[in-house]
Amino acid sequence: MDEVTLLRHSYQLIRKDFGLEESWDFEDGENQFDRLEDFLTKQVDYLLDHDLNQLLNALYRIDIPENRVKDLLQHSKQGEIARNVAKAIIEREKQKVITRQQYRPS
């Protein structure tokens, strides 16, 4: 699976799990996963400040283990929590896309 396909499918899962209505444009030539991380960091940061329950519910739906979430919240440096959570979300969604691709009937 190429990077663009992996990115698009990962973003669609993130969009569904977070209930995002806004869409994100994919541009050629940049590191798109870095852009996705920046985009998602803003979403996570907002939820950390305004609706922690919604964030925790999304992390549960994404299937990030509770001990991983606690570790990220407790051991990330101040100001890095949102980015570290965003990275964990992207990695988990990428894993799901790859696994689904591997087990998809031909």
Image (cartoon, rainbow, N blue to C red):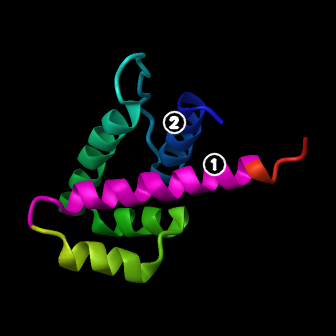
What amino acid is found at the position of numbered circle 2 in the picture? Leu
Q: Hey, which quadrant is residue 82 in on the image? A: bottom left
- Left or right: where does residue 45 sit relative to residue 13? left
Where does label 2 land, which residue? Answer: 7
Q: For the magenta stretch, what is the residue range?
A: 78-101
What percent of the width, then of the height, locates residue 50? 21, 59
Does dot 2 land on a helix, a strand or a loop?
A: helix
Vertical placement of 83 versus 64: above or below?
Answer: above
Outermost residue, right side:
106
Vertical placement of 5 versus 13: above or below?
Answer: above
What percent of the width, then of the height, locates residue 69? 36, 74
Q: Hey, which quadrant is residue 52 in on the image? A: bottom left
Where does label 1 land, which residue? Answer: 97
Residue nearest the observer in this picture, 99 or 10: 99
Q: Magenta segment: does it hold 57?
A: no
Give yes or no for contact between labels 2 and 1 (Cβ–Cβ under 8 Å).
no
Q: Residue at x 20, y 63 (%)?
A: 81
Specify the quadrant that holds the N terminus.
top right
What amino acid is found at the position of numbered circle 1 in the picture? Val
Vertical placement of 66 versus 23: above or below?
Answer: below
For mark 2, does the 10 Å Cα neighbourhood hold few (<14), some (14 to 19), or many (20 or more) residues? some
For mark 1, does the 10 Å Cα neighbourhood hold few (<14), some (14 to 19), or many (20 or more) residues? some
Specify the quadrant that holds the C terminus.
top right
Vertical placement of 18 versus 3: above or below?
Answer: below
Q: Residue at x 28, y 72 (%)?
A: 72
Q: Distance of mark 2 from mark 1, alpha carbons?
A: 9 Å
